[in-house]
């Protein structure tokens, strides 16, 4: 059975539920992204994607910048 990929991203500027909704919508539009969770208090965005889905730092930096946020870092979490 294929394992999903989990990403954790640190983002500055996420301050309200509306911000979280906008980011969730943008990330879920990426093929293979199955789940998005936003932790406003900690400035974290967690993404679960199908195996083979690759989210790159440059792409995520652009996505968050275009949405008005500052992308800080991204790491892949163990399944």
Image (cartoon, grey):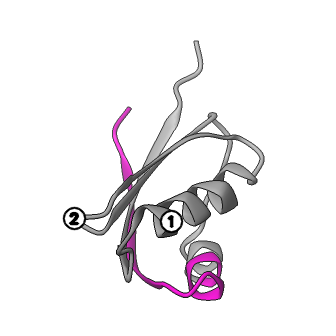
Question: Who's the residue at 66% across and 56% down the image?
Answer: 25
Horizontal side of 6 relative to 63 (left or right) equals left
For disc 2, the marked residue is 41
Crowding near pointer 2: few (<14 within 10 Å), some, many (20+)?
Answer: few
Given residues 23 and 74, the one toward you in this image is 23
For numbered disc 2, what is the local secondary structure?
Answer: loop
Q: Residue at x 52, y 25 (%)?
A: 3
Which element type, helix, strand or loop, lies under badge 1?
Answer: helix
**Which of the two residues, 43 or 33, is positioned nearer the viewer here?**
43
- Quarter residue 59 falls in: bottom right
Residue 22 on the magenta segment? no
Q: Which residues are magenta?
A: 62-79
Q: Position of residue 69 (x, y in %)?
A: 48, 84
Q: Is residue 7 above or below residue 15?
A: above
User: Is residue 48 positioned above or below 72 on the image?
Assistant: above
Give the left or right position of residue 23, taking residue 10 as reference: right
- Badge 1 density bin: few <14, some 14–19, many ≥20, Cα 10 Å: few
Examine the structure image and report whether residue 74 is included in the region drawn in magenta.
Answer: yes
- Which quadrant is home to the C terminus? top left
Where residue 13 appears, as percent x and y from the top left, is: 38, 83
Q: Which label's residue is closer to the chain start, 2 or 1?
A: 1
Q: Position of residue 76 (x, y in %)?
A: 40, 52
Residue at the spot 60% in from the left edge and 80% down from the top edge: 58
Q: Nearer the viewer, mark 2 or mark 1?
A: 1
68 or 17: nearer the viewer: 17
The N terminus - image quarter: top right
Q: Which residue corresponds to the image point at 29% horizontal and 69% vertical from the top-left?
A: 43
Residue 2: mark in rendering: none
| Relative to 67, residue 24 above or below | above
Q: Residue furthest top?
A: 1
Give the label on residue 18, or none.
1
Do tag 2 and tag 1 residues touch (Cβ < 8 Å)? no
């Amino acid at each position: 059975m294929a394992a999903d990929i989990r990403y954790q991203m640190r983002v500055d500027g996420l301050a309200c539920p509306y911000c979280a909704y906008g980011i969730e919508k943008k990330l879920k539009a990426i093929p293979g992204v199955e789940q998005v969770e936003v932790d406003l208090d900690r400035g974290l965005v967690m993404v679960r994607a199908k195996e083979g889905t690759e989210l790159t730092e440059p792409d995520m930096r652009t996505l968050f910048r275009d949405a008005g946020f500052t992308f800080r870092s991204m790491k892949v979490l163990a399944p």
